[in-house]
Image (cartoon, rainbow, N blue to C red):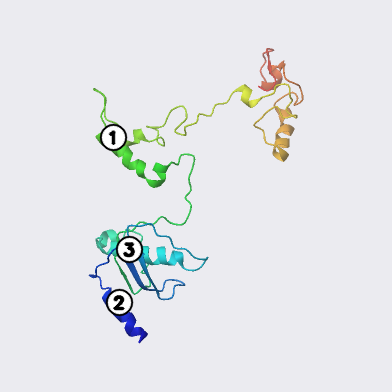
Amino acid sequence: MQNNQQASDLAGLAPDHPTDGFVRVRGARENNLRNVDVDVPRDAIVAFTGVSGSGKSSLAFGTIYAEAQRRYFESVAPYARRLIQQGHNPKVELITGLPPAVALQQRRGTPSSRSTVGTVTTLSNSLRMLFSRAGSYPDGAAPLDSDAFSPNTAAGACPECHGLGIAHTVSESSLVPDPSLSIRDGAIAAWPGAWQGKNLRDISPTWATTSTPPGGSCPRSSVTGSSSPTNSPWWR
């Protein structure tokens, strides 16, 4: 009796059956799903909730999205289909009312200091092409390639910050905030602590007379090896 009822339900959900605004899943058996039947509203934000291991991802990604991708690949030419990484066929009896689908996977990307919303979503590629092809240029100016509108290329990056938005500059005052300190006392702010800093202090006598003089001056020859007796700050 149960099998007859299920067959009747599937017959009523034939592919040409009107979906009336729902994605209808029947007999989902992906991973730990056990013949799950569910109606998901279309054109709405829907959340699958449940404890860990209850099958949320198996239903959303492993069944609904996988079926949408399978149907899309069926419409692609066989030659192009070989060049696209294809997913698996979901274990499900029937899915109707399924629109084209895009999946935002449940994993973090690997953003860098150059990552933006545009680069992560690849929208910046379209914007650069739009500026390059449809933008207006001053009279006499040559059109620019799309790379000229990207901060991550040599053609478009700022020469000062190199596309990072922050220019990192170094000065004597930033390297040695307190010239009254010696090297052993931590005069060089960029030096690390612990054993690595100790190693740097231990080798400093090989390129400087001493690591203990306070701020002020010492002969340049004692630090740089120059024969000039001109005095200069000891850290140079």
Residue at image location 53% in from the left, 29% down from the top: 168
In the rendered image, residue 140, in percent from the top left (x then y), is placed at 24, 22
Helix, strand or loop status at disc 3: helix
Helix, strand or loop status at disc 1: helix
In the rendered image, residue 214, in percent from the top left (x then y), is placed at 75, 21
Quarter of the rendering containing residue 44: bottom left
Q: Residue 132 carries which label?
A: 1
Tell me which numbered mark, 2 or 3, is placed earlier along the sequence.
Answer: 2
Residue at image location 36% in from the left, 41% down from the top: 124
Amino acid at dot 2: Leu
| Outermost bottom residue | 1
Question: Mark 2 = which residue?
Answer: 10
Tell me which numbered mark, 1 or 3, is placed earlier along the sequence.
Answer: 3
In depth, the one of 121 and 98 nearer the eye is 98
Amino acid at dot 3: Ala
The residues tagged by marks 1 and 3 sit, at their Cα atoms, a distance apart of: 35 Å
